[in-house]
């Protein structure tokens, strides 16, 4: 479930123009585990 939410967030953030690096940084700052962030889909 969390992976699905994370994947959707990454997809939406990329579509809105955020860079992959910005997304990763924001997620890690928000407390998401590094392994989940690093494995998030980039669709």
Image (cartoon, rainbow, N blue to C red):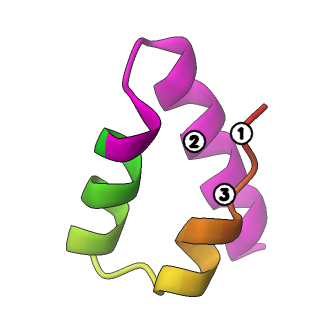
Pointer 3 local density, CA inside 10 Å: few below 14, some 14–19, many at least 20: few
Label 1 Cα crowd, 10 Å radius (few <14 / some 14-19 / many 20+): few
Q: Position of residue 13 (x, y in %)?
A: 47, 29
In this rendering, the answer to whether 33 lies above or below 39 is: below
Check if mark 2's residue and mark 1's residue have beta carbons within 8 Å.
Answer: yes
Mark 2–mark 1 Cα distance, whole angstroms, equals: 7 Å
Residue 17, magenta (yes or no): yes
Residue 1 — which label?
Answer: none
Secondary structure category for the residue under label 1: loop
Mark pair 3, 1: CA separation? 13 Å
Quarter of the image holding residue 30? bottom left
The residue positioned 57% from the left and 42% from the top of the image is 10
Please state the horizontal and vertical placement of residue 16, each as a whole percent of the image.
45, 13
Residue extent of the magenta highlight = 1-21
**Is the Cβ of the residue at disc 3 closer than 8 Å to that at disc 1?**
no
Magenta region includes residue 16: yes
Taking the view exactly as shown, the residue that stands out farthest to the left is 29
Of residues 26 and 9, the one nearer the viewer is 26
Q: Residue at x 39, y 28 (%)?
A: 19
| Disc number for residue 10 | 2
Which mark is first along the chain, 1 or 2? 2
Between disc 2 and disc 1, the foreground one is 1
Position of residue 15 relative to residue 10, above or below, is: above
Question: Tag 2, which secondary structure?
Answer: helix
Which part of the image, by quadrant, shows the C terminus? top right
Q: From mark 3 to mark 2, how far is it between C-alphas? A: 9 Å
């Amino acid at each position: 479930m969390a992976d699905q939410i994370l994947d959707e967030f990454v997809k939406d953030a990329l579509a809105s123009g955020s860079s992959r690096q910005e997304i990763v940084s924001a997620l890690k700052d928000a407390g998401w585990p590094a392994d989940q962030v690093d494995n998030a889909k980039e669709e």
